[in-house]
Amino acid sequence: MWDNTPLLRNIANTLFFCCVLATLYGGIHYLVHRPELLPIKVVRLSAVPERIIADDVQSLLRAQVRGNFFTVDIDQLRRMLEKLPWVRHVSIRREFPDQLLVSFEEHKAIAHWNNVGLVNQQGEVFEAETTQALPVFSGNEGTSPEVLKQYLAFSGQIAPLHLRVMQLALSTRHAWQLHLSNNIVVELGREAMQQRLARFIAIYPYIMAQPTARDIQLVDMRYRDGFAVRLRPA
């Protein structure tokens, strides 16, 4: 082997090439990680947020944007921004030579959830404060998408009555209860909810024509061939 000149030459060339690559890598790594090389000078927002507080974003960016164009930790910055109220998703893009472009997807609140959070249009629960007049949903953890789906369906059904669903509750036994904008509570139970609500819509003109209509507190549609009405205490 040691007298094989071509083999030794190839080994030497390979080692030399590896040394050159290692040197180049080390030099590039050193240059890229120097903070004075291409520092981030501008962070732009793709659109003006509607509900996200600008001062919160500005404070977080000042604290979290470290390094230069190559070394700034975009994933960490995205995770921190997504912890802010009303932020559903964040995307960040580098723009050479010294800028970051930040795009926000904001939550759009549909309802309150169990008096501790809000539900967005995807049925996700998030924490934020709002003064919007929103319906109230209640249910077990993890059921918010189902409650939102039924809310949209029920709302469409009762629209011809010019009523709105103000509260929608899904019990631990999976029974549905609606609180309408005229302060009537409708019990739908666990089965055939759409059909039971359709029966309520059909009888609504009849029950509202009764002398006691203003005193109706609850209409129970869980009966197979009828319904029950509860009046408010005198």
Image (cartoon, rainbow, N blue to C red):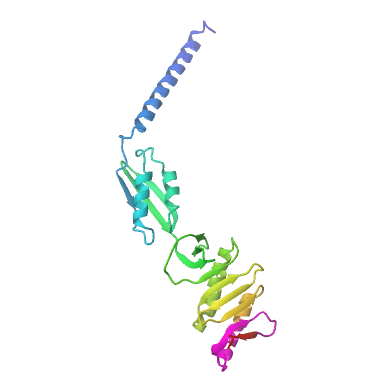
Stretch in magenta: 199-227
Residue 225 in sight: yes
Residue farthest along the front direction in this orientation? 234
Residue 222 is covered by the magenta coloring:
yes
Tell which residue pokes out farthest to the right in this image. 224
Question: Viewer-proximal residue, 112 or 188?
Answer: 112
Q: Residue at x 48, y 67 (%)?
A: 110
Please give the count of numbered marks on the rendered protein. 0
Q: Give the image location of residue 41, x and y in percent.
A: 29, 43
Residue located at (59% from left, 79% from top): 186
The answer to whether residue 49 is left or right of residue 186 is left
x and y, in percent, of residue 113 in the image: 52, 65
Q: Position of residue 59 (x, y in %)?
A: 35, 50
The quadrant of the rendering that contains the C terminus is bottom right
Quadrant of res 99: top left
Task: Classify 42 as above or below 212.
Answer: above
* Residue 53 versus residue 206 in the image, above or below: above
Between residue 72 and residue 117, name the one nearer to us. Answer: 117
As drawn, 221 above or below 26: below
Quadrant containing the N terminus in the rendered view:
top right
Q: Residue at the spot x=53%, y=81% of the render?
A: 183
Query: In the displayed image of the protein, which residue is found farthest to the bottom?
Result: 211
72 lies left or right of 172: left
Residue 167 is a magenta residue: no
Foreground pick, 133 / 27: 133
| Residue 46 appears in the rendering | no
Residue 135 position, x and y percent, is 50, 72
